[in-house]
Image (cartoon, helix red, strand yellow):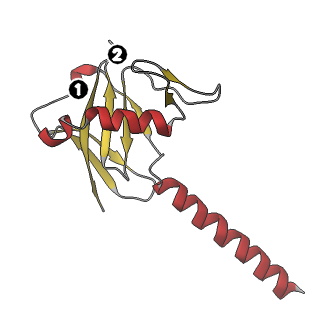
Amino acid sequence: MKRYLFLLLFGISTICLNSCAAHYLSSSKWKQYEMPPSRIIRNGEVFFGGKLPDGSKFSVFADETIDNDASYYYTMLMQDFGWSKKDEKTWTAPQDSREYKLGHIYINPSRQAAIYFYPNGNYLAFRVNISN
């Protein structure tokens, strides 16, 4: 009987741990950090970094190629937060959808991209480098 109980608990904990890891790496996971605009550097140097829950480190920097894709990453962030495009200028969402905050940077490790929302409402995209 003890062996069956052990196997049941082991199986449940294995499923839970695998589910948590898969959820963390999903593309809908955006990590949020408060940041004043004066810390943003657009010359390619790393201006922000940190550590992810899995122990790997990330760094954020400007990249010419990602500038062209800024609206793409903005759209991905909005959709991951539960919003959908109503018309050319309007987004709509259910009541429990997440909203972005001005003066914050959002890091998506699986997309290796970041979006910064300036306090005036403009945004820029940045490249994220992940290292173990």
Q: Is residue 111 above or below residue 62?
A: below
**Residue 2: x percent and y percent?**
86, 85
Residue 35, image x and y in percent? Answer: 33, 26
**Residue at x-position 61% and y-position 65%:** 17
Q: Position of residue 118 (x, y in %)?
A: 31, 19
Q: Which residue is mark 2?
A: 121
Residue with the most extreme right position: 1
* Quarter of the image where one finds residue 6: bottom right
Label 2 Cα neighbours within 10 Å, binned few <14 / some 14-19 / many ≥20: few
- The answer to whether residue 53 is above or below residue 97 is below
Lateral position of residue 26 relative to residue 4, left or right = left
Q: Is residue 54 above or below residue 102?
A: below
* Viewer-nearest of discs 2 and 1: 2
- Residue 48 is situated, as x and y percent measured from the top left of the image, at 26, 38
Q: Which residue is mark 1?
A: 39
Q: Residue at x 16, y 30 (%)?
A: 41
Label of residue 29 in the image: none
What type is the residue that disc 2 sits on?
Answer: Gly
Task: Using the image, determine if residue 30 lies above or below residue 78.
Answer: below
Closer to the camera, 23 or 14?
23
Q: Helix, strand or loop at disc 2?
A: loop
Q: Residue at x 60, y 62 (%)?
A: 19
**Which residue is painted at 37% across and 41% down in the image?**
107
Dots 2, 1 in contact, CB < 8 A: no
Closest to the observer, 112 or 94:
94
Q: Is residue 126 left or right of residue 18?
A: left
Q: Is residue 44 left or right of residue 61?
A: left
Total labels: the figure holds: 2
Q: Nearer the viewer, residue 13 or 25?
A: 25
